[in-house]
Each structure stands twice: as structure tokens, then as C-alpha cells.
Amino acid sequence: REDYAGPRFDAAVDMRSGYRTVNMLAGPVWDGRVVTGVIQVLNKRGGTFERHDQMLLERIAEAIGPALKGPPTRAGGAG
């Protein structure tokens, strides 16, 4: 299990939740130059995450970054 060997992996979370993490891929969600969140996927079916998986996750993160900011507001209050 590749993630259990990682120095930043906390197996206690799996133990408490009963979930079994096999592998994971995570990356930042940006809004311009500001990190607004993190996107993470777990347990790829049929193998380990590869470069094309990372590229897809980055594209998804780019698309959702602006959405995390919420809808644009108009000057002068609601309306």
C-alpha cells in the first residue's frame, strides 16, 4: 500500500473511519494566484495514478477554482 509508507500519511484516519486508502492524488485549487482549496481523489481502480491522471485532476481543479469563490456580487448590495 503505497500511501501507508509515505511520511505525510496518517493511517489513524483509515483506522477510525474503516476506509482503506490504497493510493491518492491531490493538488491545489487555484483562483488566479490564490489557493482556495485542495482536490483529492482516492483509490484508483485498476492500478496507480499516473501522469495523465494528474493532468486531468489539474484541469478539473482549474475549472472549479473560480466556482469556489461564489457568484459575482454587484456593487451596492444585493439585488
Image (cartoon, helix red, strand yellow):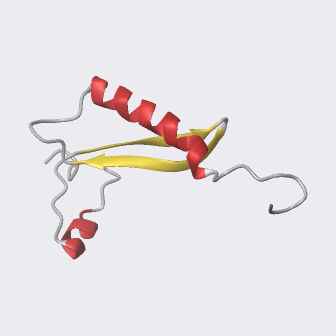
Q: Give the total number of marks visible in the rendering.
A: 0
Which residue extends farthest front? 79
Residue at coordinates 21% horizontally, 46% vertically from top-left?
Answer: 23
44, 21: nearer the viewer: 44
Q: Specify whether 33 is left or right of 29.
A: right
- Image quarter of residue 16: bottom left
Q: Specify whether 13 is left or right of 45.
A: right
22, 41: nearer the viewer: 41
Q: Is residue 78 above or below residue 60?
A: below
76, 56: nearer the viewer: 76
**Residue 10 at x, y = what percent?**
30, 61
Q: Is residue 50 above or below residue 9?
A: above
Q: Specify whether 62 is left or right of 8.
A: right
Q: Is residue 64 above or below residue 18?
A: above
25, 59: nearer the viewer: 59
**Residue 7 at x, y = what percent?**
31, 50
Residue at coordinates 30% horizontally, 55% vertically from top-left?
Answer: 9
Residue at coordinates 19% horizontally, 47% vertically from top-left?
Answer: 43
Which residue extends farthest right? 76
**Residue 35 at x, y = what percent?**
60, 44
**Residue 78 at x, y = what percent?**
80, 63
Residue at coordinates 37% horizontally, 35% vertically from top-left?
Answer: 57
Q: Specify whether 75 is left or right of 27.
A: right
Which residue extends farthest left? 46
In which quadrant of the rendered image does the C terminus lie?
bottom right
Q: Is residue 23 above or below residue 16?
A: above
